[in-house]
Amino acid sequence: MTSECPECRFDSATATDVAGDIDALGRKFAAPLTRYLPGEDGPALLRTRPEPAVWSPLEYACHVRDLLRLFDERTRAMVAEPGVAFPSWDHDAAVIQDSYNDQDPAQVADDIATATSDYAQTLRGLDGAAWEAPGRRSGDGQEFTVDSLARYGLHEAKHHQLDIGRGLRAARGR
């Protein structure tokens, strides 16, 4: 069975420096959120949904920021209390409740840089056994470890980089 995502090609099984890869994400999100083509209204493009049911590039970026913050928090909780249960996070509700599309793209880019750095620092501070600390979702009981959570978070962030690029291309009419 492959662990490679057929869409973004990320393979969680071959990721050898998860903390380093997460740390590097901050720089990769800065460009699409802060640099625009001459004459473009970048913030307007970032707020454009390619389809009504598809998030805008800015909404994807805010999701990544909040996911990384949440996974950092959950990682620390799992190490402190192995087996801890977490409620499911309604990320679709967060888009509306937290007004993702009204946020400042440059601030979101800065926030992602901070979130990636903080999460990577947490992961780098773990010993070998801590990577296997368990946690679970309280609703369905799905179990995971610090390692599988970090790999999932890395995949989500990398995958959503594609979503941001697709959204910007659609907003530009390409």
Image (tube, rainbow, N blue to C red):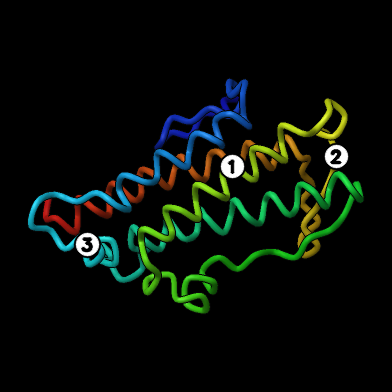
Query: Residue 42: x and y, percent?
Result: 21, 59
Q: Is the residue marked by circle 2 packed among few (<14), some (14-19), or many (20+) residues within 10 Å?
A: many
On residue 128, the disc is none
Kindly indicate the quadrant of the structure image that contains residue 58: bottom left
User: At label 2, which amino acid type do we have?
Assistant: Ala
User: At label 1, which amino acid type do we have?
Assistant: Ser
Which secondary structure lies at badge 1?
A: helix
Query: Residue 64: x and y, percent?
Result: 50, 53
Whichever of labels 3 and 2 marks the residue nearer the N terminus, that label is: 3
Residue corresponding to mark 2:
133
On residue 117, the disc is 1
* Cα gap from disc 3 to disc 2, whole angstroms: 41 Å
Query: Residue 34: x and y, percent?
Result: 29, 52
Which residue sits at x=40%, y=39%? 28
Which of labels 3 and 2 is toward the front? 3
Taking depth in this image into account, of 159 and 63 the one nearest to the observer is: 63
Which residue sits at x=48%, y=31%? 10
Query: Residue 119: x and y, percent?
Result: 65, 44
Q: Quadrant of the N terminus?
A: top right
Residue 65 relative to residue 41: left or right: right
User: At label 3, which amino acid type do we have?
Assistant: Leu
Kindly indicate the quadrant of the structure image that contains residue 101: bottom left
Q: Is residue 119 above or below residue 19?
A: below
Q: Is the residue marked by circle 1 packed among few (<14), some (14-19), or many (20+) residues within 10 Å?
A: many
Which secondary structure lies at badge 3?
A: helix
Which residue sits at x=31%, y=44%? 31
Q: Is the residue marked by circle 3 packed among few (<14), some (14-19), or many (20+) residues within 10 Å?
A: many
Residue 53 relative to residue 62: left or right: left
